[in-house]
Amino acid sequence: MNLDEKTIFELIDKANKTRECAFSPYSHFSVGAALLCKSGKIYTGCNIESEVFTPTICAERTAIFKAMSEGERDFVAIAILGGSSALSKVAEYCSPCGVCRQVLAEFCKADNFDVILYNGTEYKIFKLKDLLPERFTL
Ligand code: THU
């Protein structure tokens, strides 16, 4: 889908606000995500870290699992913003980790779902097939 600029910046803005909810006392890196569903609803997510590290969840998976647990199954786009918790504004692109790429690729369309990254000045948009080519499937 071709997203208009208003929608792109609405997602960027929501992802940025959600960074404030990140719980990241170990990495001091806060990430926010905003996921647009075909229903029109936007689900946000932040990273939440655990003292034993492994259960830590990324912002992207928080958002998609929140949406799926409300019955959503059709996804249009996700905006992801991350950076040092010490800085209020992001200064670099936060590229989704491999685990989140796999999860997004399982539930979103390879060539019809936009992954929006923002560095505080400019945005870039990727398709999942480019972020995770030849992904694992059962
Ligand atoms: N993180 C995310 O939330 N999303 C990503 O795609 C990359 C990493 C989080 C996990 C951890 O809490 C912190 O950023 C540093 O890795």
Image (cartoon, rainbow, N blue to C red):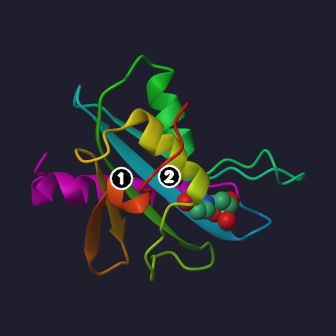
Give the quarter of the figure containing the N terminus.
top left
* Residue 126 covered by magenta stretch: no
Q: Which mark is first along the chain, 1 or 2?
A: 2
SS at badge 2: helix
The residue under label 2 is: 101
Q: Work out whether residue 23 can be spotted.
A: yes
On screen, residue 109 versus residue 21, left or right, reads left
Q: Is residue 42 above or below residue 93?
A: above
Amino acid type at mark 1: Leu
Give the quarter of the figure containing the C terminus.
top right
SS majority, magenta: helix
* Residue 19 covered by magenta stretch: yes
Residue lying at 45% horizontally and 83% vertically, measured from the top left? 91
Query: Mark 2 near mark 1, Cβ–Cβ under 8 Å?
Result: yes
Q: Residue 42 at what x, y percent from top left?
A: 33, 37
Q: Which residues are magenta?
A: 1-23
